[in-house]
Amino acid sequence: MDRPLAIKSRGTTKSFGNVVALDGVDLDVAEGQIHGLIGPNGAGKTTLLGLLLGLAAADSGSLEILGAPIRRALSAPEGVAGFVDGPGLYPSLTARQNLAALAALQGRDAGTSRIDDVLDQVGLTDVAEDRARGFSLGMRQRLGLAAALLTEPGLLVLDEPSNGLDPAGTRHVHRVLTRLAANGTAVVLSSHRMDDVEALCSEVTILATGRVVFSGPLSKLAAENSELDYRLRTSDPDAAHRLATAADGIHIVEDLGPRHDPQVLVVRALEPALDELVTRLVRAGIALRELAPVVSPLEAAFLALTEQQEAGR
C-alpha cells in the first residue's frame, strides 16, 4: 500500500525579478521517506527548500505539505521543521539555553527531559552547558538538528546537514534521520555529498536550472545511467587484463595518470558486461580483491544529467 504524501508539488514556479529559480517543479515525497535533493549551484535547491519551510511563496503551481495546501508564506507550515543556509543560533547562549529559547519562540514549552533527549540524539550531551559561539560548524549543524527535533515534525527539511561533521557526528546524524523515517517522518535533505545521499536516501530529485531532470529511486537512476568506470584489484593483474581485453562490452581505461596503481585494472562497462567479466575471473581462478566504481553511479548520473540540461539552455 502506498504511503500518504508529505509533499505534493505540481508545476511549482518561483522567480526573483528576471531570474527563474524554479520552473514547473513536480515533487512527491512520501511519509517515512528520506528524499535527496541535489543539483549544481544555482539549480534552485535552496529556493525549493525555502518554499517547504514557508520562507517564501510560489508564484504559480500547487504545493501541499502534510495534506494541507500552501498558498502563502507566513511561517513554517504546521508540522514542518528544519533549516536553510545553516541553523539560526544565539552565540552567547549554551546549547541547552538555545533549545529552550527556540522552543519558546515557537510557543512551545520544551521540558528539561525533552531537551536532554534531543541533545543526546545528536551527540551533544557533553557540551550542553557550553556556549554556541565556541562550537565548530559541525556542532552548530547538530544543534540546529536538535532544535528541529524538539517539534517532533512530520516533515524535516535540511540544507547540507552533514556540513562540517566529523565521522562521529555523521554517524549521529545518520542514525537520527534513519530513526525518524522509520517512525513515519518525511525527510528532505539537500547535499553536495553524494555519499550521504546514497547512504540515506531511498529516492532522489535532481534539479538543474530550476527544472527537475530526474526524480525517483536511486536504483532506477543507476540503471538508466551509461557505462561506468570500475576499479578491479585481483590476484593476477596481467591475467585479468587479458580476460578483460577479450570480453565483450568491456573497455580498458588506459589514461589513468601518473599516480595510478599498476596493480589495479580500470574498465568501463555496463553492469551486465561487468558481471560477466567477474564470472570469468572467478572461473579462471583469479581472486577478486576489490571492485568499486571510480565515481559512484549517483555522481556519474548527476554529472551527465546536469551537463545535458546546461548544454540545452
Image (spheres, rainbow, N blue to C red):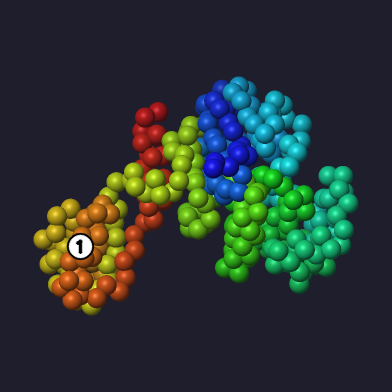
Residue at 61% from the left image edge and 62% from the top image edge = 175
Identity of the residue furthest to the front in this view: 1
Q: Position of residue 139 (x, y in %)?
A: 69, 62
Work out whether residue 252 can be spotted.
Answer: yes
In the rendering, at what x and y percent does residue 138 appear?
Answer: 65, 61
Number of marks in picture: 1
Q: Between residue 116 and residue 217, name the one nearer to us.
A: 217
State the image coordinates of residue 232 (x, y, percent, origin top left).
Answer: 27, 67
Q: Looking at the picture, which amino acid does disc 1 mark?
A: Leu
- Taking 291 as reference, is 185 above or below it? above
Residue 122: horizontal and vertical position, in percent? 69, 63
Task: Kindly tell me whether residue 38 is visible in this rendering.
Answer: no
The residue under the point 54% across, 35% down is 27
Residue 313 relative to residue 241: left or right? right
Is 264 left or right of 208, judged from the image as shown? left
Q: Residue at x 38, y 52 (%)?
A: 297
Q: Which residue is mark 1?
A: 277
Q: Is residue 131 above or below residue 5?
A: below
Snapshot quadrant of residue 15: top right
Front residue of 13/222: it is 222
Instruction: Answer above or below: position of 172 versus 299.
Output: below
Between 101 and 117, the one nearer to me in the picture = 117
